[in-house]
Amino acid sequence: MLKLLGLPVSIWPLLILAGDVVMFGLSVPIGFALSRRTLESPWFFVDQFKIPIILMGLTYIVVLYVGNLYDHYQDFRRRESISQVILASLIGTLVVVIVFTLPTRHVIGRGFVEWQGVALVWLLVLWRCAFSAIALPLRLQRKVLIIGAGKAGQEILATINRCKNSGLVAAGFLDDNPQKLGTTIQGSPVLGNTGQLDEMIRQYKIGMVVVAITHEKSPPLLNNLVRLSFMGVQVIDMPSLYEVLAGKIPTDHISDVWLLFHSLNSAKVYYRPFRRLIDLVSAALGLALTWPLWILIAAAIKTDSRGPVFSARNAWGKMARPSTSSNSAP
């Protein structure tokens, strides 16, 4: 885990990003060769058009980010994920064609852009599939805790055990039926009840909680799951995980409510990253335009009062105060 601007950032999305940059770099000479340009070499071509090529690469990265394709736990070997990569690459190519090759704003050859886009599609698919094939089974394994040891829980456990390369390893069950406590189901133990959820997550280092309860869930359990989700533990319902692993929806374990929320969440796949991107760009522009004002404000604060200009809060929400000696005045 790295820190960027004081925030924890996983190294895995950065690794995917680095691979995307390399794939884009490879697609440039391939696009040059396929478009049959008459320049001396692709390196001369790159030198002549380095600014448009850099902007093209940034365009592809933004489109991939908006498409939520930097989720390192996503299995890019799945048909749906491959389709998302291809669609995002084609959208990026369309944007590049419109921006750089329109007749009134001709910057770079359309033949090169089109062939480079075709090459990039296949290079990105190969790179993402290779990443998932290597990283998921070995480096990105996550322990899964299944809530509910009934039929739905047993079915998702069997599905996890069948998908050996998914990166998921079942740690066990939680169930409120006291008769199941201490038993073993398909080789996985029933570790405790739902009231011990926090304890089990810490003890077994759980990365994903699967809710496999088909009946109505208690309000304390729902509140706990929401809290854990905000703490970084992935919480997913059984039908959604089954759909990801098996490629189909378990019709015996879904309800009308699940179908509603599934449709709403699917519609937000592109909205959330795009909203985040707009927020970051707006904040950066705001800082760039107003930084002289902040310097004046900081200088005014410094001349008017003692102590630091900036104050930080600790994890408990209290203001961090500079240390004072015992001889300081009260």
Image: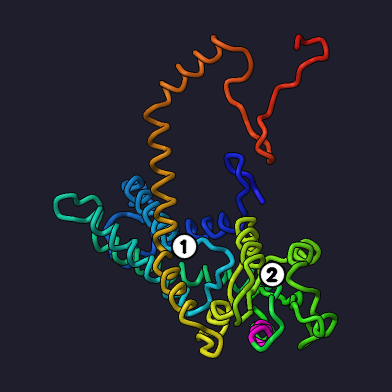
Examine the residues drawn in magenta and state their main secondary structure. Answer: helix
Q: Which residues fall within the magenta stretch?
A: 152-160
Question: Identity of the amino acid at label 1?
Answer: Asn
Badge 1 crowding class, 10 Å Cα cut-off, few under 14, some 14 to 19, many 20 or more, is some
Q: Left or right: where does residue 157 sit relative to residue 297?
A: right
- From the top left corner, tell me how far across and down residue 256 is, in percent: 46, 81
- Tell me the distance, in whole angstroms, between the alpha carbons under discs 2 and 1: 20 Å
- Asked if residue 294 is positioned above or below residue 198 in the image, the reply reads above
Vertical placement of 73 versus 164: above or below? Answer: above
Q: Which residue is mark 1?
A: 68
Which numbered tag is attached to residue 48? none
Q: Nearer the viewer, residue 312 or 25?
A: 312
Q: Quadrant of residue 324?
A: top right
| Pointer 2 local density, CA inside 10 Å: few below 14, some 14–19, many at least 20 | some
Check residue 141 in the rendering and tell me which mark sits there, or answer none. Answer: 2
Where does the image place residue 294, in percent across and percent down from the top left?
A: 45, 23
Residue 240: quadrant of the picture: bottom right
